[in-house]
Amino acid sequence: MASKLFEAKKLCAFYGSTQVLFDVDFSIHTGKITTILGANGAGKTTTLRALCQTVRTTGSITLNAGARDVQLVGESTDAIVRMGVAHVPDGRGTFTALSVEDNLKLGAYVRSDKAEVARDMDKAYSRFPRLAERRHQQAGTLSGGEQQMLAISRALMLRPKLLLLDEPSFGLAPLIVAEIFRIMRQINAEDGVSMLLVEQNASLALGLAHHAYLLETGYVALSGPAEQIKSDESVRRAYLGY
């Protein structure tokens, strides 16, 4: 079994005085894809923000950093990025006034290995040829699908241990979604990048992920192997709506 890369215990998250997550326990294994499912308002996006420490949290989030375990609660977001956590937020979050190429360069801002950065940029263009065609184009003029490709590629320029993805299919045409998810599977298989995926399309997410957690109003309602959850008709009807 793969080792645990991240483990959260009794994780609570707050916006001001409003509590959104309640004693959530989950883990992410090295080289695996984990998905968090649930209805709007269940706390999925907040879970990603808690990992990045952009919301107030209590409890424990432990990163297996190799020689030692690191406690992330209380760390700065910048420090967590430097530990290898890359976040692709909902709404893509590209720097719209900058070119595609400059967006990719910004993704590698914490790296000093220029030759490897250049190789990773070539890899991004190879995986997403549309970005290569538009490398000097302003990011804000790209289509929604192209901006999502750019957001994922920019995050990968960090060479992350963990890639956080928030609703990567939102607002995109089915063919574009299928292409992006195919490449996400390829990135996981070829580069061994661990992923935590938040996704409204439960069927799509369960088809990609190895393990799944279902959130319900800030609590973990169910967890298990993604294939098992996908094939359980009673679970699908009760929690996933399909």
Image (cartoon, rainbow, N blue to C red):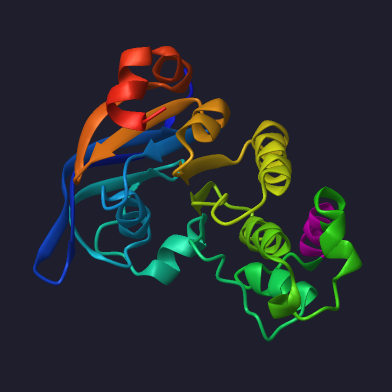
Is residue 117 magenta-colored? yes
Q: Is residue 58 left or right of residue 33?
A: left
Q: Is residue 1 left or right of residue 124?
A: left
Q: Residue at x 85, y 71 (%)?
A: 135
Query: Picture coordinates of residue 75 (x, y %)?
Result: 31, 65
Judging depth in this view, the residue of 189 and 240 nearest the camera is 240
Up/down of 30 relative to 77, above or below = above
Residue 38 lies in what quarter of the image? top left
Q: Is residue 97 left or right of residue 117?
A: left
Judging depth in this view, the residue of 240 and 53 nearest the camera is 240
Q: Residue at x 64, y 68 (%)?
A: 107
Query: Picture coordinates of residue 103 (x, y %)?
Result: 70, 74
Residue numbers of the magenta segment: 115-124
Judging depth in this view, the residue of 209 and 80 nearest the camera is 209
Q: Residue at x 65, y 59 (%)?
A: 148
Q: Main secondary structure of the magenta part?
A: helix
Instruction: Quarter of the image for the C terminus: give it.
Output: top left
